Image: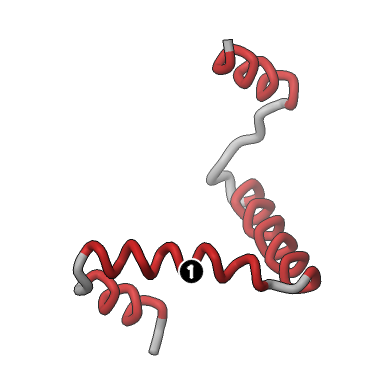
Amino acid sequence: MSIEELEAEIKKLPLGDRAALAKWLVESLDELSDSEIEALWAKEAERRLDELEQGLVTEIPAEEVMRRARAALS
């Protein structure tokens, strides 16, 4: 079964069942080994780099990120 097929089936579930499934999925992430977590982060880093290289996103300097974060907290 593909992810798309699984998503379609999940959308057919009642809201409470989908919420329980979401909770279980999030909790199941804690069961990953360190090497699995590292592999997931590496994949995410590659995805983000691809987005940058394709021009789908733009970089934000760290100083700007920190300025926005401070402004949001105050």
Residue at label 1? 25
Residue 1 falls left or right of residue 18: right
The percent position of residue 71, horizontal first and vertical second, equals 59, 12
Residue 63 quadrant = top right
Query: What type is the residue that disc 1 sits on?
Result: Leu
Q: Residue furthest bottom?
A: 1
Q: Residue at x 38, y 70 (%)?
A: 21
Q: Nearer the viewer, residue 61 or 42?
A: 42
Q: Position of residue 74 (x, y in %)?
A: 58, 10
- Residue 24 rendering spot, x and y as whole percentages: 46, 69
At x 26%, y 75%, the residue is 8
Q: Is residue 63 above or below residue 23?
A: above
Name the image quarter holding the N terminus. Answer: bottom left
Residue 41 in the image: above or below residue 72: below
Q: Nearer the viewer, residue 56 or 1?
A: 1
Q: Is residue 14 left or right of residue 59?
A: left
Q: Residue at x 64, y 66 (%)?
A: 30
Compared with residue 66, is residue 22 higher up or lower down, i.e. above or below?
below
Q: How is the image coloured?
A: secondary structure
Examine the image and state in which quarter residue 35 appears. bottom right
Q: How many marks?
A: 1
- Is 63 on the left-hand or right-hand side of 22? right
Within 10 Å of disc 1 (Cα), the crowding (few <14, some 14-19, many 20+) is few
| Residue nearer the viewer, 50 or 6 | 6
The location of residue 25, given as percent across then percent down, is 48, 69
Disc 1, SS: helix
